[in-house]
Image: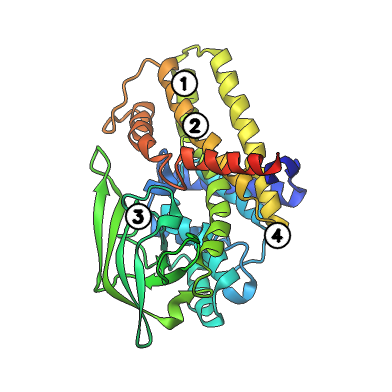
Amino acid sequence: MDFLSLQPVSLSEELVKLRREVRAFLASELESGAFRAHSDQWLAGWDPEFSRRLADRGWLGMALPTEFGGSSASPMARFVVVEELLAAGAPVAAHWIADRQSAPTILRFGTQEQKEAFLPRIARGECFFAIGMSEPDTGSDLASVRTRATRTDGGWLLNGSKVWTSGAHHADAMIALVRTEAPSERRHAGLTQVIVELPHPNVAIRPIRLLNGEHHFNEVVFENAFVPDSRVLGEPGAGWMQVTSELAIERSGPERILSTFPLLTAALRWAVDTQTSLDEVQLGRLVARLWALRRLSLAVAGKIDAGDDPAVAAAMVKDLGTRFEGLLIDTVRSLVDIEPDPQSPDELSRMLAEAVLHSPGFTLRGGTNEILRGIVAKSLGGAV
């Protein structure tokens, strides 16, 4: 029950100073027209140039050692930076997966050659990653992975498919979870992570479009796709242990509560500009829930910073955060008399449409709410 051991986390003066620096940078970017705020930008805001401007300031690969291009900062420093980026609706999708989880995973489990090949490029904003976990017909049950990796001379041949693979059509590589041994009674055994460099002649990437035609998700199909031994990440058969430690990072960050936050700030600006009075009770409830979830996310970041693996607490953040994202949309729609329109020149109408169209995917990415509640329930049952 790791969520019961969470402790409040306070930010140091150094981190408060860092927050001010990021805010000043974002204000300058917005004023110059370098980007326009949107909802759900860690999925939809693909802008490699913006990513490289962050890298120039040392705000990518922050927790990586300096020998691999990082700044040896803490996960808490990264938390502060990404919190400001998300709140501003900045376009962070290009580097998001690589910076959030691919780099830490390679740093922890990768060979020296893999670290040298990928980590400096990630820190420079020159190498972007996708996640190859979910599969068709398996939902969030990673133990049922069916994509096979079969031994061949010098490496492995991959056959199977992944789904909901965000940004794969842009990515330079993906870390895929594959089955290297036949399924047995131990469902979690025989899984391995491999780094698949893209584009690949035997990897087909097929778009899964949103209702408005936007292309962020993909189905990725492997047909005898060769992956050399040098791109096996960690030990063959250790994939389950590796991927579950990775999920704690994926599920607990501020993106789980701030995807729709720019919509709230747009609604408040609209209320000021139009001199419209909003229901203070509903706003208060929303902000109170936001603040509580932020404290929970911050506490999980503190556990990760301390070297712990708070998988259950991360599942709670993701489940509660996903529900909050939807609640924020519903609350804003009840407070303002504006119809969502993705083509509208009005910021609030446009951003409301973006949030509504993206909302069905909130529970898909990082594990469905039902699976996450099962993780929490099992941890409680084991303690009784």
Compare marks 3 and 4 and give the one earlier in the sequence. Answer: 3
> In the displayed structure, would residue 274 be above or below residue 359?
above
For the residues carrying marks 2 and 3, which lies nearer the camera in this image? Answer: 3
Q: Quadrant of residue 334?
A: top left
Q: Which mark is residue 307?
A: 4
C-alpha span from label 2 to label 1: 12 Å
Give, as a three-letter code, the residue at label 3.
Glu
- The residue beneath circle 1 is 331
- The residue beneath circle 2 is 323
Give, as a three-letter code, the residue at label 4.
Gly
- The residue beneath circle 3 is 135
- Secondary structure beneath label 1: helix
Looking at the image, which is closer to me, 41 or 196? 196
Give, as a three-letter code, the residue at label 2.
Arg
Q: Position of residue 223 (x, y in %)?
A: 25, 70
Kindly indicate whether the residue at mark 2 contacts the one at mark 4 (C-beta within 8 angstroms): no
C-alpha span from label 1 to label 3: 33 Å
C-alpha span from label 2 to label 3: 23 Å
